[in-house]
Each structure stands twice: as C-alpha cells, then as structure tokens.
Amino acid sequence: MVTVPYRNSAAGASAHLKRDIEARIAALDVTITETQSTLSALQLQRVALVSELDQLRGSWAPIHTLPPEVLGEIFQYFQPYFSASLLIDTEPAQTAHIPWFLGLICRSWRQVAINLRGLWSVLCIDDLPRRMTNGGYYHYDLAYLPNDDLEVELQRLPQDAVLTEEDVEGFDIEWKVERVKTCLERARTHGLSLRLHTIQTVASDLILQLLLQRSRHWEQVILVETCPAICYQIESSGQHFPRLRYLTFENQWHSTELYSPIMDSFLHAQASPRLTELRLANLHIPLEKGVVPIRWSALKKYSEVSCLVSPSYRTVVLQQLVNLVSLSVKTTSTFMWTEHILFPNLRHASFALERCSGYRAVKGPFTLEMPNLEDFSILAMCLGTLSGCLPRSSPHLRKLSVSLMSVDSHQGAAEEVLLFSQNWRMFLCGDQIT
C-alpha cells in the first residue's frame, strides 16, 4: 500500500485557490471595463444635456415668463409711428415691419402680436418701386405670407428666373395688396392711421379701394404729394370719416394745383365731424371765385408750413378759427390782415415770417386778439415795427420768444415793449433792429 505524502495534498489546494483568485480578478476586469464603457456613455450623455441646456437658457429669460397681458403692454410700445417731419420718409419704413418681426420670435409672441389691433392699424402706402438697384445688385424687401402659422415664409422675387416687367409689377401689386388686407383684418375696428404717398399706381388704386371700405375707422390721414385725381376719387366715393381727428396735406415742393376743393372733401361737416387738427405744408392755396374754406371752426390745432396762401384767404381762415388752442404759421408769403381777429381760446401761438421777394413779411400791426394766450413765439426777417408784432391784450402770457432781423423801429420802441412785458418769464430777442 502506497501512501501519498501530505505535501502533495497541500500543493493541490494551493493551485486550486490560485485559479479561483485569477478567475475572480478576470471577472473584476470585465466588470471594470463594462463600467468604464457605461461611464463614458454617461459622460457623453451629460455633455449633450449640458449643451442642450445652454441652448435653452435664452428661453428662460424673464421676458419669457411674463403673462400675455403684460407682454401685450410691452408690445404696444413697438407700434409703428409717423414722424412729425413728414419729409423724413425712412421712419415709417423702419417701423412698418416691427409687428411682423415680433411674430417670428416664438409662437406665444406671435399670438400676442396678432391679437394687438393697434400694431396693425398704422399703414404707410407709397408708390416707390419694390425692387431697387443698389450698388450693382438688386435689393428685395421682405414680405410675409398672411397666415397665422409659426413658420412664416419670406416672399422674394425668384433671383434665377428671367422676369419681365409685367412679372415684377404683378408681384409688387400682390405683395402690397395682401399686406394691407392682412393689416386691416388684424386691426379690425381699431382706428386707422394712414400715410398715403403719391399713390398713382394700380396697386395703390386697389389699396385705396380697400381703405375706403374702412373709412369709418380713419383717425389720422397724411396725404403726401397725392395727385388731385386720388383726392377727387376720395371725394366722389361719398364716404364719411366720423372718427377722423388729424389731417395733413403736404408736398415736397410748392404745387400749382388748387387744394381748396381737395381739402373741402374732408372738411365739410358731414364728412369729418370730429376733425380737430389740420396741417398744411408746401401748398398753393389761392382764393378764387369767392371760394372760402368750410368746416374750419371746429379745429383746435392749425399748422401751416411754407404755403403760398392768398392773404385774403388766410384772413378768412383765421376768422373761422374761434375754437383754436394752438396756432403755428411758417410762411414766406406776405402775412397780413385788414381787421381785428379774435382767438378766444388760443393758448399757444408760433409765427415764422420770412422775407418774401424783398417785401416786409408783415404788413400792418399785429392785431390778433388772444386774451388767453400763454405761450407766444415769433421769428421774422423783415418787420416794419417792433411793438406792433407782439400781442398786447394777453394778460396770461408767461412765455415769449422773439427773434427779429431788420426791424424798422423808432426811438423808445424797446422800452415800450418791455413796459407791457413785465410779467413774462422768458424774453429772447434777436438783433439787427434799425
């Protein structure tokens, strides 16, 4: 009988333990590899989520947390506007696209903008060509398809296609008419502010027909270099303007057309019973065949800039302005009147009287009676008297601005003026008083 030594049994147990440990190490290596792979995947996911989070941070700005009613109040400040100087044509163009741009930010902004009627109530219509040549390439304005979806397409003339003049004109007509239709639909019953510049093309004729259908909503109308035919079309339409409050006629140079019949189409009592503010600029307004303006007595603000007005016509006009609160006249034509004219409610008056063909800007004394006048300014190039150009019967006058050049004055005239100016807060006087 052979006996196995104890030493051999111990060696076998040690080898078995070694294999077991190695197996466990191999298993751990596999687990570590798998864990590292999972960790790498998790790290990649984290990087992607961080990047997505960074992109979304902009939408977490405080303005995006505002309720629609507050956002609507803010949007009201972006309503298009017209400059006080109508010769600056860029301002309406710069602000006209703002309502459309607000709708491109996000769906909630677009919904708020569409529901704000005031944003769509200001329309600037002109006959400038839509496609302009600038530096050897064509520039295309942006136009928006009148739909209420978030994705708004930008219409452009096809740049690769060969276009005829008829194609361009047709595209222009469609673009302008659709834009006005969309604005009128979104404005609904809100009062409209219109600036009509020239309007002698087919597109403008179609647009004018659309606007006349909403004549009862006109509140502000500015006619710039508008041809008489268009004004007569407005008159012949028989439309009334019950909400019209502000009216402007303006040319960029003196026109030889007679504007009194054109103004009468807006100024008679049945057409515009609420008209209170009128502005005329660079117009030729003679008095012929006994024609006198009507519907002027309700005006509260009257402004006249560089108009060739018959002195007799202007006298008739001033005599009717009994409810006037603000009067502004800037003219190169002779400013005169033959009798006293009373302005019982006038508070603010401004005159800029320039020399006309070598003659005095004002003939005769300043005989306007303004008992409630508070603010008075005068700029004159050639006067025959110093004291005669200032109001005397205005006990409430507190602010006076005077700029005079080439005034014929007698000795003591300045003391005479200062005698009845002791209660005035401001007195500015120009030089070259002879």
Image: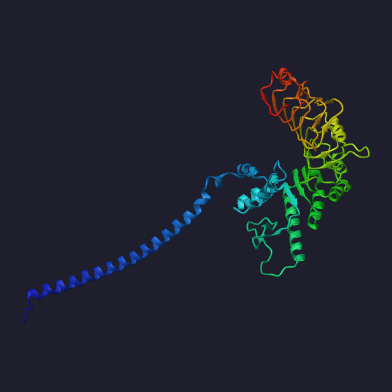
Q: Residue furthest bottom?
A: 1
Q: Is residue 80 left or right of residue 322?
A: left
Residue 272 location, quadrant: top right
> Residue 56, position in %: x, y?
50, 53
Give coordinates of residue 223: x percent, y percent.
Answer: 78, 46
Quadrant location, the C terminus: top right
Front-most of residues 166 and 78: 166
Q: Quick check: can you spot residue 104?
A: yes
Query: Residue at point 84% right, 46% down?
Result: 256
Q: Quadrant of the N terminus?
A: bottom left
Relative depth, front residue between 142 and 201: 201
| Residue 243 appears in the rendering | no
Q: Give the image quarter of residue 10.
A: bottom left
Return the residue nearer the eye: 242 or 28.
242
In the displayed structure, would residue 61 be above or below residue 14? above
Q: Is residue 102 above or below residue 8?
A: above
Quadrant of res 45 = bottom left
Q: Which colour assignment does the render follow?
A: rainbow
Provide residue 116's location: percent of width, then percent of height: 68, 46
